[in-house]
Image: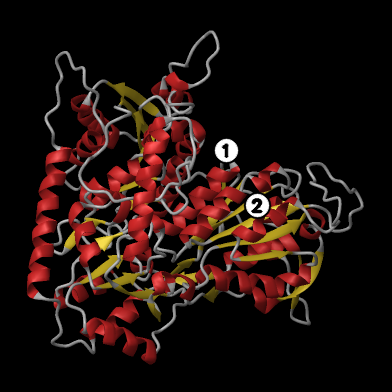
Amino acid sequence: MNQRVLHHDETVSSDADAQVSADGTIRLTAAQAVVRYLAAQLVETEDGESTEPLFGGVFAIFGHGNVAGLGEALYQHRHELPTYRAHNEQAMAHSAIAFAKAHFRRRMMAVTTSIGPGATNLVTAAALAHVNRLPVLLLPGDIFVSRAPDPVLQQVEDFHDGGISANDAFKPVSRYFDRIVHPAQLINALPRAIRVLTDAALCGPVTLAMPQDVQATAYDYPAAFFEPRVVKLHAPSPVASEIDDALLVLRNAKRPMIVAGGGVLYGHATDTLKAFAHVHGIPVAETQAGKSALAWDDPLNLGALGVTGSPGANELAHEADCVLAVGTRLQDFTTGSNTLFTQAQVIGINANAFDGLKHRGCIVQADARLALEALTSQLEGWQADASWTARAQQRANEWRDIVHRLTHAPQRVEGQSVLPYDADVIGAVQRSSERSATDDIVVCAAGTLPAELHKLWRAGRPGAYHVEYGYSCMGYEIAGGLGAKLARPEREVIVMVGDGSYLMMNSEIATSVMLGAKLIVVVLDNRGYGCINRLQQACGGAPFNNMFDDCVQGAPGAPDIDFAAHARAMGAQAEHVANVQELEAAMQRARAADRTYLICIDTDPARTTDEGGWWWEVAVPEVSSREGVRDARADYEAHMSARGRDNQ
């Protein structure tokens, strides 16, 4: 990344030059103390041979609630803890979260905003981090503790509780929340925050609400509090009794399956997972967060699981007698709304007990790598039935052949009347580089694309697949791509995004240009919310308010949006292509470009990959005047009855 720091030749002063007093204290404002403390936190590099900063920097949009306090402090430490300006508070938090995800939770970033809309814009991102178990430190400005100017500009007043501010909205979406009402409070609050951010069982967003008068208040802190410290990432070791219980289930299993979740990646357990699967002949299926835990062409990789899963993975999951759910929170897209694992005893291997206990699992609360190592050390000689393993390998090979066929389908060019769909685009993107399966990082979040990518993207290296589908947050894509690029500047980051998500949040294209953090953005334009339009009709509804053609329109009609021109207006290079062949050629130009490059292609809003998939529960109205809704309700009730019978 080409980083340009303004005023780099100016003399650093203020808290950076603060002197230690005879009593071993140093006088700093609360804001200066926060920044100095964060800058002093270190973590071992991935090779374990040196250390690097735990925090990769701070994203900031300044306002009256943080510019004078945290803004001044960040300026003093701009060399040790870089500050990055963004264009949207929610987006910059998404970037920070993606940075941590791309680092497998080893490194992270902080985010600071003013009070009011700047702070509340972070709430959606906090929920995203919470759902995905990803670390981010949120430092929103807050109202005056003194209440002297009460109500200050942008203050949300509660008529029944004078101690509440807009930042209380963070409480349900933070793993740890604190409001710093006195500078001394940081001595306890900051270590607690770091522990939550670096603990595999607790990991998620931390919010330290920073009242603006407290930010500017000085206190005599112990100087030792700011000494550089190597943070140890914490993950629990397995308990012998839980391993024994899991072994009892495994040894009696004939048809086991592994479900690889994000915890495999975050626990650096990918090699351990591969060895465990091959030694014991156990097929592996991957969740959205776990995809890339095993190379796409591994003989035991059945591919995606669940609602967006491959045929073989779902077939075997439905017949398995034991499921090792490793590092997954078992959301409904993974379990097919709890209809997939109907014959299986689930072993939940998870650092977080809340997740490990799901699906009435036999829990092993532990780091994924340590748990798998403990199990295999006592499973010598045990394997899945040979016929089960052979069948899994056959299904995996069949699925790879199907993926190749779908992503290499012949395209009409002359007089083309059939628009490409997502599989065609995915194939073209991956064909544009021989090393795409290992070197590229694909980023996505919402709509149809996560389903298609989960099935069809060939991820050959851990981290090559970066899809946020825990919160399925439209607008994450481009901001998340920026965070991934800041984390992995040597990799090509390809953001695949629908027109709906692009329109919802695209401002970080400008940030990527400003930072020299090049992205390739591929926009699939189907002229509306195609995914929800199909779901609407699958539930018996009429096409309504999703596609441009089905929305209320004024006299000018629906807009004809030129996404390439829009991206160019933000400093990127961009072009619109007419077909898949042109897309492949444009991808070569994008790879050779020195700045963010956007390619837009029109796609079919109706077509999706028929192969694979599983039932997903979406409640259909019990009464309706529409025959289609009544038919969909009957189908819904049939699935509900079947689930009830299967789960008895």
Sort mark 2 into few (<14), some (14-19) or many (20+) by Cα contacts within 10 Å: some
Q: Is residue 261 above or below residue 600?
A: below
Residue in view at x 38 percent, y 75 percent: 361
Please name the amino acid that badge 2 sits on: Tyr
528, 238: nearer the viewer: 528
Please name the amino acid that badge 1 sits on: His
Residue in view at x 77 percent, y 53 percent: 165
Q: Is residue 498 above or below residue 292?
A: above
- Provide residue 239's location: percent of width, then percent of height: 40, 88
- Provide residue 543's location: percent of width, then percent of height: 42, 26
Q: Quadrant of residue 89?
A: top right
Judging from the image, what secondary structure is the residue with disc 2 in? helix
Does the image show residue 535?
Answer: no
Residue in view at x 54 percent, y 67 percent: 197
Disc 1 or 2, which lies upstream in sequence?
Answer: 2
Q: Quadrant of residue 521?
A: top left
- Disc number placed over residue 75 in the picture, else none: 2
Q: Residue furthest top?
A: 555
- Provide residue 398's location: percent of width, then percent of height: 10, 52
Q: Are marks 1 and 2 in contact (CB under 8 Å)?
A: no
Please indicate whether residue 390 sits to the left or right of residue 425 in the image: left
Sort mark 1 into few (<14), some (14-19) or many (20+) by Cα contacts within 10 Å: some
Query: Label 1, on which residue?
Result: 87
Q: Quadrant of residue 325?
A: bottom left
362, 1: nearer the viewer: 362
Please indicate whether residue 126 sits to the left or right of residue 455 in the image: right
